Amino acid sequence: MQRSLACQRPEPDPPRISLVRLARADADFVHALFRDAAVSGQFIDPTALETPVGARAFCSASPKLTGQHRFAVHAAVSGMQVGLGMVRDRTRSAGYATIGYALAPEVWCRGLGTELARRLCAVAFEPTSAVEVRASVKPTNTASRRVLEKLGFRFVGRRQRNGPSGPVEVQRFVLRRAEWPLVPHGAVRVVRWSARS
Ligand SMILES: CC(C)(COP(=O)(O)OP(=O)(O)OC[C@H]1O[C@@H](n2cnc3c(N)ncnc32)[C@H](O)[C@@H]1OP(=O)(O)O)[C@@H](O)C(=O)NCCC(=O)NCCS
């Protein structure tokens, strides 16, 4: 895949979103987000988030138990919740981290998805020694593929993942640490996050 020059775009200044650790109070938003088929249809197994009980459990789960850091995404100006971001830190066991994200359809196509994914990469790279960040995308998810491409991720192959109704094909993308000079050190601020929590 050809690398996009767009990945050289600087971080918008000031940032248009902030990340705050996901909490039980975010469950209604997360549930509503995943009731929208345009969002849940892009995830391999969104079933847990499609019920109020599942969304509450997801939002209040400890990163120590899940191995995943989960963030509510807020619009910086209005403070309104607009999405969800996730970083699974597998640095100790496997040397890499994975990211996942979703935004409310009302805010799509304004560059926020790219800003969010960039922020999640910073969360994945900066407090850890991860050698790479990985993301998996359904082949039909053009917007997410484009987001990853803009950040310099490379397509590395396909694999089957288990979904609720059988195997699902995903495309795998990787961004290596050496390819992460995009955000000047210190330019990314993650609210209320600790590598140890
Ligand atoms: C993926 C997602 C976060 C992208 O958010 P976003 O705010 O729209 O992203 P951006 O505006 O930063 O960039 C989207 C890019 O995809 C492009 N795009 C969007 N839909 C497209 C389509 N159907 N065909 C081609 N390109 C498309 C946009 O033009 C833009 O590229 P550009 O900047 O070169 O013009 C959002 O679509 C989403 O939440 N989707 C549902 C959940 C999801 O897919 N999560 C990822 C699972 S891997």
Image (spheres, rainbow, N blue to C red):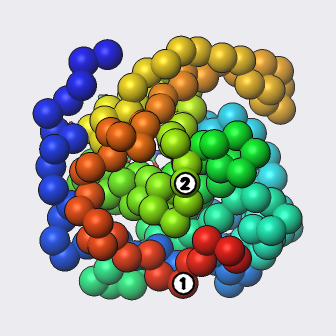
Using the numbered discs, state the Cα–Cα distance from disc 2 to disc 1 in whole angstroms. Answer: 20 Å
Q: Amino acid at mark 1?
A: Arg
Image quarter (top left, top right, bottom left or bottom right) of the N terminus: top left
Is there a contact, CB below 8 Å, between mark 2 and mark 1? Answer: no
The residue at which mark 1 appears reads as 192
Quadrant of residue 183 in the image? Answer: bottom left
Question: Which residue is at the front of the view, 28 or 96?
Answer: 96
| Residue 139 horizontal side relative to residue 181, left or right | right
Front residue of 81 and 172: 172
Image coordinates of residue 3 in percent, x first then y, are 24, 25
The front one of 120 and 48 is 120
Q: Report the quarter where the C terminus lies.
A: bottom right
- The three-letter amino acid code for the residue at tag 2 is Ser
Whether the residue carrying mark 1 lies under 8 Å from ligand 1 is answered with no
The residue under the point 75% across, 68% down is 63
Relative image position of residue 102 (x, y in whole percent): 51, 53
Residue 189, percent from left and from top: 37, 76
Look at 53% across and 15% down and name the residue there.
157
Q: Nearer the viewer, mark 2 or mark 1?
A: 2
Residue corresponding to mark 2: 129
